[in-house]
Structures are given as structure tokens and as C-alpha cells.
Image: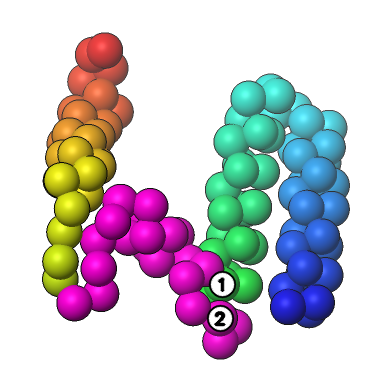
Amino acid sequence: MRISLLFFGLALLAVFAASVSLMASGFDIWTAVWLAWALLFAGIEGVALTNDEKGDTLSEKLRNWSGIKSNGGRSPRSWVIFSALLLFFVWFPIHILTGVI
């Protein structure tokens, strides 16, 4: 756990340094922030994937938060969350390709 926290702290520092470097290279603040967010997510998920702890990856957290059981059982809340995710993943490519909404 301590190594994971140390890695997370170093990842935060690296993201901050990358953001400052990107802005110094001419990127606007929003580009730097979104790229930093992507790097931070990759760092967090990378730590979660490489350790032996259960319930620390994003997919495991989503299953836990939505009430989806490992044996396939689902709560009504899980269907609401699943439907929202499905709608997002249908809407987002259309939004990117067309610029609508």
C-alpha cells in the first residue's frame, strides 16, 4: 500500500510538471488540464492493475458503486447506472463526429 501511495504522489507531481511544461510549450490551459487528467488516470489505473488488492480498478469500483455482484446479480440501481453509461457511450462519438450538443 505504501508503494502505491508513493507512486500516486509521484504521479501527481509528474502530472503537475507535465502540465506546466505543456503550457510553456504553447498549449492552452484546458489542453494541459485534460492531458494531465488522462495521465493521472493512467497512473492510478496502472497502480491498481499491478497490485494484488481487490476493488481498486475503475471497473471494480463501478461494479461496487452500482451494486453489481461478481456472481452476476444486479440491483435496480445497477440498471440505471448501466443505462446512463450506455447512453453516454452512444452520445459521445456522435458528439465528437458532428459537434452537435
Figure quadrant of the C terminus: top left
- Residue 2 point in image, percent of width and height: 80, 77
Question: In the rendered structure, which segment of residues is drawn in magenta?
Answer: 51-71
Instruction: Using the image, tell me which numbered label, if any, was put on residue 79.
Output: none
State the count of labels: 2
* Residue that mark 1 sits on: 48
Task: Classify residue 45 as left or right of residue 98.
Answer: right
Residue at the image position 78 percent from the left and 31 percent from the top: 23
**Is residue 60 rendered magenta in the image?**
yes
- Residue 26 point in image, percent of width and height: 75, 28
Q: How did the renderer colour the structure?
A: rainbow
The amino acid pointed to by label 2 is: Glu
Q: Are marks 1 and 2 in contact (CB under 8 Å)?
A: yes
Figure quadrant of the N terminus: bottom right
Task: Give the secondary structure at mark 1.
Answer: helix
The amino acid pointed to by label 1 is: Ala
Tell me where residue 41 sits by quadrant.
bottom right
User: Looking at this view, is 58 or 34 the one in front?
Assistant: 58
Q: Is residue 96 above or below residue 81?
A: above
* Badge nearest the viewer, 1 or 2: 2
Task: Classify residue 34 as left or right of residue 99.
Answer: right
Q: Real-space Cα distance between discs 1 and 2?
A: 7 Å
Instruction: Using the image, tell me which numbered label, if any, was put on residue 53.
Output: 2
Q: Is residue 80 above or below residue 99?
A: below
Residue at the image position 84 percent from the left and 53 percent from the top: 13
**Is residue 91 rendered magenta in the image?**
no
Mark 1, Cα crowd under 10 Å, few <14 / some 14-19 / many 20+, is some
Q: Is residue 51 above or below residue 81?
A: below
Tell me, yes or no, if residue 89 can be seen here. Answer: no
Residue that extends furthest to the bottom in the rendered view of this protein: 52
